[in-house]
Image: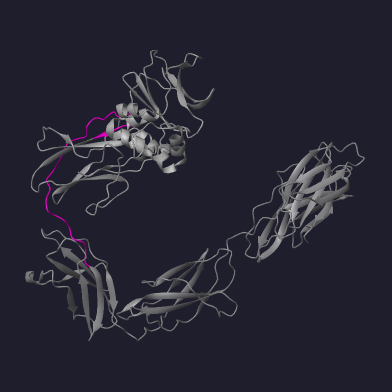
Amino acid sequence: MKKIIFIFLFYSIAIYSQDPAYLIFRNSGNVYLKWEYLRDNNHEHFNIYRQYENSDTWEQINQKPLKLITDIDEIVYIGGEYYGSIYLSLMGVKREKRDITKADIIAWQNNAEAYSMLNALSVTQPLISELTGTSFLDVPQSGARVRYKINSMRAADELHYITSEFIDPKIDDIVPTPDDISINPLNNSANIIWSRNLDVLQSGRAVNFNIYRADNITGPYLIVNFADMFQGILTSEEVEIDTNYFNFLDANLINGKTYYYYLTGVNTFGFESQRSSVYEVVPSDNRVPMSPGDITINEFGGRLKLSWRNISRVRPIGYEIFKSIGDTDNFVKVFPTLDVQYDPEITTWTDADVREGEFYSYYLVAIGQTGVRSETSDTLTFIIDDYIPPSAPVGVVAVGDTGAIKLSWEANTEHDLLGYQIERSSDSRFATRFLVNEKPITGTEFIDTVRRESQSDIAYFVYALDKSYNRSLPSERVIVRVIDVVPPLTPEMTSIYEEGDSYFVNWTKSPDSDLKAYRLYLSIGDSSNFILKTETNSLTFSDRISERKEHYFKVSAVDLSGNESPFSRIRRLEIEDEAPRPPDSVQVVQEEKYVNIEWKAPEDERVVGFFIQRNYVEKGSPMVDLAVLKADKSRFMDWDVDINRECTYYIYSRDEKWRLSKPVVINYVPNSK
C-alpha cells in the first residue's frame, strides 16, 4: 500500500494573520491550541495564560511547564515506538536510545532541515506536538470570549511569545470534508483524486486525509492510505499530476470487481470530518497508449514517406494516420483503409497523392487493446519544394485615418498562395523599409497602427508569399499620411509679474515638432471671462495694464492641424501700486545630497514669506513649486533635486495677499560640470 507524501512547513500555516504561527480549534466547549516552537537556544519551556474578554486578568492555565520532552522513557510512553523513534531521530539520537541532552536540542535548532521537519510533523501529528511541548487543551468555564497568551521562559526571565485573537469557545470549528472527488478505474487499481485547497491546508483545518474502501456499499470500510505522516501528492508513472488536486493510487485491486470509497479530512488536532459521499468504481484494463513518437516525413520521387515508433509501455493494436491539405483543421483519415492493416509492426506509410507547392499536414493516433485511442500526436507539416514566386499584388490602396492606415489590394490567383507581407517606409527618400507583419496576412485588407501625432509621409509595399515561401516582387508604392488629432503638450507659465505700468507673462516651450503658435488668454477682475489676448510664437508676452484689477492668465499650444492643447493652470496677478521687494543676498550651494538655498529678508515690512520654484534646463521641463515659507525662514534645502542636472531656481518675496515680488533667478550648475 502506497502513502501520500506532502512537504508541509509549519511557518506557512495560520488561521489568523500572525507571526509566529499558531492554530486554534474549538470543539464541544474545548479549545485546542498549537503553535510553532521557539527557535532560541535560551528557551526552556512555555507558560500559557487565559484572559476573558470581560476581564483584565491573565490567568496561568498550564499546571506544569510545556517543554521538549527529553526523558527517553517519557518519550516512548507518549509517542510509542513509532513516533518516539521519529522524534529521537530528528533530535539527533539515532544509534542508541537515550535521554535528549541540551547539546542535542541546540544542534537540532541549528539544523534547518531537522527543525522544519519536526515543526511540520507537529502540525500533522498531535503526539509529536505533545513531545515538543507546543500544544495544549483548555476548557474555559466562562461563556465569555477568550484569548490566550504564550510566554517563553528563559532562566529567570519570562518573555512574551504569542497573543491570540479573542475567540468564542461556544462555537465549534468544522473540519472540512474533502470535495471535488473523482475516482478513475485503472488496470488492477483505482486513482482517487480530490481538491487541494491551499487555504484549508495552511489554516490547519485539514492536514491529513483518510481514504476508506469496502467491497460492499454497506461496509465494513477500512482505511487504505494509512495517512500517518504528511499528506499530499502521489507521484506515479500511471497517474498525471495536477498540483491543484491530491492523488492516491489504490493498487492490487481485481479487475471487474466493484469497490466503494469515501474520504474524510483530519485537522491538525486529529479531529476527523464528516465522511464524503460514497463513490463506486470497477477497475479494468483500459489503459490508453501514448501517441506515436519520433515521427518524420521525407520526400522521395514526388512522394512523402511517414515513419514513427511506439514510445508507450502499453502495446497498441495499430495506428491511424490523418491528413489535411492546406487547411490544417480539415483532417481526413487516410490510413488504414482495411482492418487487417491495424498492425503494431507497421510503422511506415507512403503518401503518393501529393503535388509541388502544396501544404500537407499529418498526425497519428495509437489504438489501445480495448479500442481506446491515444491523444493525437504532434502535427507535422510538409511542402514539396516550389521555386516559382507569385506575381506582385496589384490595386493597392492606402487611406489615412486617426492613428491608423487602412490598406487594401486585389487578391492573387495562385493556388498555393500562403498570404501577404507588408513593408513600411517613412524616411524622406523611402529608402529604408520595415516589415509590418511577421505572420503572412491571408486576406486582402490590413490596418497599420501608427502614432496619432505622426505627420510624416508613409510609403507601403505589398508582397505575395506562396507556401514554399517564394516572395513576389513588391507592389507599386503607395504614399499616405495619418490624420493628426493629437494636440500639443500643454505649456506651463513660469512667471507672471508687474513692472512699471505693464505686466509680463512667461511660459515653457512645447516640444511638438508641428507646433504653430501659443495662445494667451486673459480675464480681468475674476477668472470667468477669458478672452484670447494674443497668438504668438514667442515664449513671453507683455502689455500695458489697462485696469488696476486682478489679472488671470492661462496659456495653450496650437499645432499646424489646428489641434489646441488643454489649458495650463490659471495664474493670478494681483495688480497693486507696488509689489514687495525681492529677497536679498540669495545663494545656491550644492551639498552632498541636496542643494542649499539661503537668502536675507528684504527691508520691507509688507513681506510675510517667500515662495520658491525650480525647473530643469532641458526643453519642456515643467516648473515645480518647491516651498511656501514664512518670513522668519531664510533657508531651504532641496532634497528632491537631481544634483547632477542643471536647473534654475526662482525665489520670490510675497505679501499677505500673495502678491509676489520680481523673482531672484539663480542658475544652478552641478560641481561635476
Residue, x 64% and y 56% (percent of image)? 565
| Residue 291 picture quarter | bottom left
- On the image, the x and y values in percent for residue 673 come to 78, 61
Depth check, front residue: 604 or 643: 643
| Residue 204 picture quarter | top left
| 258 lies left or right of 442 | left
| 490 lies left or right of 267 | right
Depth check, front residue: 76 or 662: 76
| Residue 259 picture quarter | top left
Q: What are the residue bounds of the magenta stretch? A: 264-292
Q: Main secondary structure of the magenta part?
A: loop
- On the image, the x and y values in percent for residue 515 come to 67, 64
Residue 471 vs 579, above or below: the answer is: below
Depth check, front residue: 215 or 106: 106
Depth check, front residue: 1 or 198: 1
Q: Is residue 270 magenta?
A: yes
- On the image, the x and y values in percent for residue 405 come to 49, 68
